[in-house]
Image: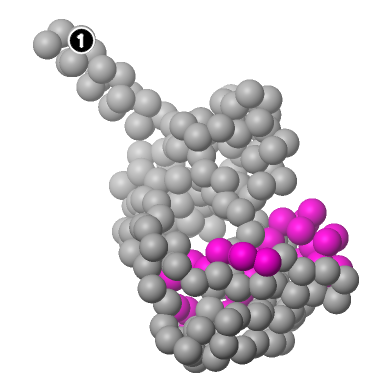
Amino acid sequence: MENENLQAVLEAVMARLFVPLEASGRHVHITKEQAMALFGHGLTPKRPLSQPGQYLANERVTLVGPKGQFENVAVLGPERPEGQAEISLTDGKTLGITPALRLSGDVKGTPGAVLRGPRGQVKLEQGVICAKRHIHLTPETAKRMGVKDRQDVKLQVYTQRPLVFDAVTVRVSDKFADFVHLDYDEANACGFQNGDLGRILTEGD
């Protein structure tokens, strides 16, 4: 019982100081109309993701650029109002596309690409981005950590190759779960492994 109590206290302290890290690979978001064009039906959930209501779909696409393509690219649901492809800067070199560094959903004026599915293809006139590294927080966690929505912070990551990421954008919503999202370039740079943690640095750190 004593060990269980100690473990509970330790987990509570960790939750107050640290945020779990996640690595996000290349993926796309599509509209209902695009899903019909690509697959002949809407998206079907395969498994839930860390953010409430979000899921990995059973469906996959081929992402095509001017110089190359990636097959079997993950599609995340649910469907969105506008299509979007999130790739790393390294992916962009393979595709022949220079993705815009943006937060998810901010696609105005970004490069386009082609999505191919088993039933057809869709041309994205815009929407290819490299997701700006960010932290999802609930309002309660954000208040406790002294940060606000859209604030840029420094983040110490405790990984195999520890480093400090600058310009990490805080995103706050009661629809979020607490997670840091890095792309694969960033995850590889710090030697990320599942279960690794990050800590928002304050002025005195």
Whether residue 75 is situated above or below residue 16 in the rendered picture: below
Horizontally, residue 128 falls left or right of residue 175, namely right
Q: In the image shown, does 116 or 84 lie closer to the viewer?
A: 116
- Name the residue located 44 percent from the left edge and 67 percent from the top edge: 57
Give the class, few, some or many, for how many residues have Cα within 10 Å of label 1's Cα (few <14, many ≥20): few
Q: In the image shown, does 2 or 167 lie closer to the viewer?
A: 2
Residue 165, percent from left and from top: 66, 38
- Name the residue located 65 percent from the left edge and 80 percent from the top edge: 116
Q: In the image shown, does 98 or 147 lie closer to the viewer?
A: 98
Q: Residue furthest top?
A: 2
Quadrant of residue 48 within the rendered picture: bottom left
Whether residue 176 is situated above or below residue 147 in the rendered picture: below
Horizontally, residue 74 falls left or right of residue 58, namely right
- Name the residue located 44 percent from the left edge and 62 percent from the top edge: 56
- Name the residue located 71 percent from the left edge and 81 percent from the top edge: 114
Q: Which residues are magenta?
A: 71-99
Quadrant of residue 97 within the rendered picture: bottom right
Q: Residue furthest front?
A: 118
Residue 24, percent from left and from top: 57, 52
Residue 152 seen anywhere in this rendered image of the structure:
no
Q: How is the image coloured?
A: one colour
Amino acid beneath label 1: Asn
Magenta span contains residue 85 = yes
Residue, disc 1: 3
Q: What element does badge 1 sit on?
A: helix
Residue 151, percent from left and from top: 55, 52
